[in-house]
């Protein structure tokens, strides 16, 4: 059974979310305080976190940032304020998705299922073949822990950056068009477009390339797309 942590201080909302998710076969825990929620997220073994933005003690932005630095599971942010959405996007917190309140519980369940399925798809490659790690020059991708190091120094990637890098590295020299990358990595999300890919590739390069303007790994083929050089 997949387990979900809801960090939400509005009891009625949290309970509504819980009831819906439980009726769809998920195991759910609720935490109303931000600081305790973060602690639980880091110490527990949840498959997904639903995270409110305005919380007592510690806000959702900071919680998301800290979760991302430590573990790689889907984080779905919820907020009552539309202006928070820009902040979630702009800060590059690494949230996998976001929803504005009020939303329908069935929409929430659909998104939760989509993100869990996506994570499973991305980690399913582990059992195919014996290579748990991909090593290309100074770059190492550990598929089991979803960690990336560059010359033995860990690169802190968001989940989307990791997914992109893994897709490239698993298909060296294959040319991907932006639209294809968007479809494969973001597929089920309704937000964003192919321009999102450009932004993520730029951030990814800043994290893995010695000189992002002269990339050694992800090469731009102008007017065509991108390719992972080996
Ligand atoms: Ca709140």
Image (cartoon, helix red, strand yellow):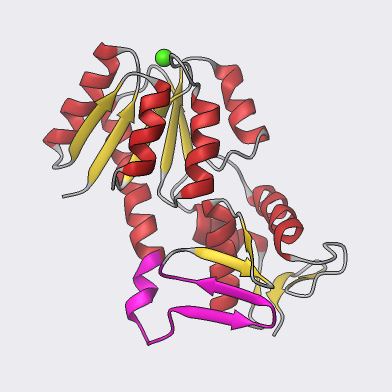
Dividing the image into four equal quarters, which quarter contains ligand 1?
top left
**178 on left or right of 132:** right
**Image coords of residue 63 (percent x, y):** 49, 31
141 inside magenta stretch: yes
Depicted 172 relative to depicted 114: above or below: below
Depicted 221 relative to depicted 178: above or below: below
At 78% across and 75% down in the image, what residue appears?
216
Determine which quarter of the picture holds residue 166: bottom right
184 inside magenta stretch: no
**Image coords of residue 9 (percent x, y):** 34, 15
**Image coords of residue 24 (percent x, y):** 15, 39
Determine which quarter of the picture holds residue 227: bottom right
Depicted 9 relative to depicted 52: above or below: above
**59 on left or right of 125:** right
For the C terminus, the image quarter is bottom right
Q: Which residues are magenta?
A: 123-144
At 29% across and 16% down in the image, what residue appears?
13
**Image coords of residue 173 (percent x, y):** 67, 83
**29 on left or right of 205:** left
At 58% across and 21% down in the image, what residue appears?
84
């Amino acid at each position: 059974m997949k387990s979900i942590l809801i960090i939400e201080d509005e009891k009625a909302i949290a309970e509504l979310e819980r009831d819906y998710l439980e009726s769809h076969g998920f195991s759910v825990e609720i935490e109303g305080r931000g600081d305790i929620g973060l602690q639980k997220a880091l110490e527990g073994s949840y498959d997904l976190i639903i995270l409110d933005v305005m919380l007592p003690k510690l806000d959702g932005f900071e919680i998301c940032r800290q979760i991302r630095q430590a573990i790689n599971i889907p984080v779905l942010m919820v907020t009552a304020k539309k202006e928070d959405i820009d902040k979630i996007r702009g800060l590059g917190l690494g949230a996998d998705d976001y929803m504005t309140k009020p939303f329908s519980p069935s929409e929430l369940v659909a998104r939760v299922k989509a993100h869990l399925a996506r994570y499973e798809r991305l980690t399913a490659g582990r059992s195919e073949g014996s290579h748990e790690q991909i090593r290309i020059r100074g770059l190492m991708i550990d598929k089991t822990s979803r960690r990336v190091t560059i010359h033995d120094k860990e690169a802190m990637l968001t989940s989307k950056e990791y997914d992109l890098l893994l897709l490239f590295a698993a298909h060296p020299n294959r040319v991907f068009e932006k639209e294809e990358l968007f479809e494969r990595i973001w597929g089920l999300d309704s937000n964003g477009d192919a321009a999102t890919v450009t932004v993520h590739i730029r951030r990814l390069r800043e994290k893995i390339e010695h000189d992002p303007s002269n990339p050694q790994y992800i090469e731009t083929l102008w007017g065509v797309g991108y390719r992972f050089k080996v």
